[in-house]
DNA sequence: TAAATCGGAGTGAATGTTCATTCCGGTATG
DNA sequence: CATACCGGAATGAACATTCACTCCGATTTA
């Protein structure tokens, strides 16, 4: 492979623009301009706008997973592992607000919904450390015996909502708030 | 008085289509077809697609508020009032899934974000029974002393997330789940 | 009362705009 | 000079919106 500068520029520009304006608010021409390339050049690196959107999502998800699993200790108690994960997730998104906005957009789109379906209904082949925790927790009677989707909602609903308000400037997610919120999430799913 | 049949048909068609496909997935021509009117007719009732979207939202919000405040007892204890509200909200959305999907779309759009800003940052002139409960609860030291936006997120994040999964068919929101979820919401915000 | 006229709701083809995508001439690279 | 790579004008499809026209019930006129 050769010069990936342009590829990266396109990705960066897309991320910034889409996170701010949404998928439909950003024409390819705008991405091209911001990336400093010709409109046609984008199509040398991506098949379509759709695949640009999807690939960008995958790229972000990989980055996030990598970050989450750094320092993850499989042998700690369930609660510790859970709190560790959501804490890191919040850290990540506070440090990368554009990533959050992008993922949120994606999640609230047809792409994201089918992805979510695969996750919470447990499509075979998908491996998800969080879902493993849920399964283990239900099994060991530590967590409520709810469908995985419900545990996910109860645990992540408030976090996502808080993150958004933080990034939009409606609240300031300080250490105290994070502490309380993560504890509340745990209390919501524990038996 | 004039005949409002067409107006109502347009509103009904818009609600169904937009709830299912999203704002951008629904051309005006599609709405016209489903409503059984000419494309131009829509513009006799609404100035633009934008105002159709906004007016539909307002209409729904009024309906929902009306329903919520039916039977609301201002003299009950704070906790009871809070639980009453979120319970009724869930009932409403379970009974009207299209309304939920529409409101969710709206909420996750630029329109909704500025509306949310007005709400949680307390734009003067807006009167919101829920925010009153938060203010009173903080004042009486019943609720955590967090910004209103944070209380809102912690209380409603899980509900919205659960509602969505219910409507998409990922979980079944039965009485038990509702009970547990609403209690968890309260526990999340109480001191 | 019957005919003529009016007003305004309703229509949908036409318009103009905004894109995603393509294409081809130019430019760097080897 | 040949090859790979780029740019951005050109293209065509999808849409929101407009407008010249039709239709029909109400109102006026004869």
Image (cartoon, coloured by chain):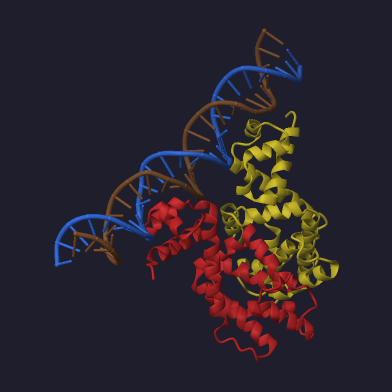
Chain colours: A yellow, B red, C blue, D brown
Name the one closer to the observer, B104 or A93.
B104
Q: Is residue A154 above or below residue B31?
A: below
Viewport quadrant of the N terminus of chain B = bottom left
- The residue sitting at 80% across, 78% down in the picture is B145
Rendering quarter of residue A165: bottom right
Name the one closer to the observer, A64 or C15.
C15
Viewport quadrant of the C terminus of chain B = bottom right
Q: Residue furthest right?
A: A175
Q: Position of residue B29 (x, y in %)?
A: 43, 51
- The residue sitting at 62% across, 78% down in the picture is B86
Rendering quarter of residue A82: bottom right
Residue A76 in the figure: left or right of residue A32:
right
Q: Is residue A65 visible?
A: no
Q: Is residue C11 above or below residue B45?
A: above
Residue A150 in the figure: left or right of residue A78:
left
Rendering quarter of residue A88: bottom right
Q: Is residue D10 above or below residue A60?
A: above
Q: What is the count of numbered marks? A: 0
Q: Position of residue A112 (x, y in %)?
A: 60, 54
Q: Position of residue D4 (x, y in %)?
A: 68, 22
Q: Position of residue B180 (x, y in %)?
A: 64, 79
Residue B109 in the figure: left or right of residue B16:
right
Q: Is residue B62 visible?
A: yes
Q: Residue furthest bottom?
A: B75
């Amino acid at each position: 492979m050769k010069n990936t500068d342009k590829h990266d520029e396109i990705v960066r520009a897309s991320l910034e623009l889409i996170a701010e304006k949404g998928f439909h608010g950003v024409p390819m021409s705008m991405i091209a301009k911001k990336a400093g390339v010709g409109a046609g050049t984008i199509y040398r690196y991506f098949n379509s706008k759709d695949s640009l959107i999807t690939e960008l999502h995958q790229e972000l998800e990989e980055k996030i997973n990598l970050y989450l699993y750094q320092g993850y200790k499989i042998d700690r108690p369930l609660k510790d592992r859970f709190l560790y994960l959501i804490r890191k997730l919040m850290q990540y998104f506070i440090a990368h607000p554009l990533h959050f906005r992008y993922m949120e957009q994606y999640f609230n789109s047809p792409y994201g919904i089918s992805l979510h379906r695969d996750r919470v209904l447990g499509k075979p082949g998908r491996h998800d450390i969080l879902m493993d925790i849920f399964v283990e927790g239900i099994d060991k009677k530590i967590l409520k015996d709810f469908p995985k989707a419900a545990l996910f909602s109860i645990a992540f609903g408030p976090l996502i909502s808080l993150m958004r308000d933080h990034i939009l400037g409606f609240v300031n997610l300080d250490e105290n708030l994070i502490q309380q919120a993560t504890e509340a999430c745990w209390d919501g799913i524990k038996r």
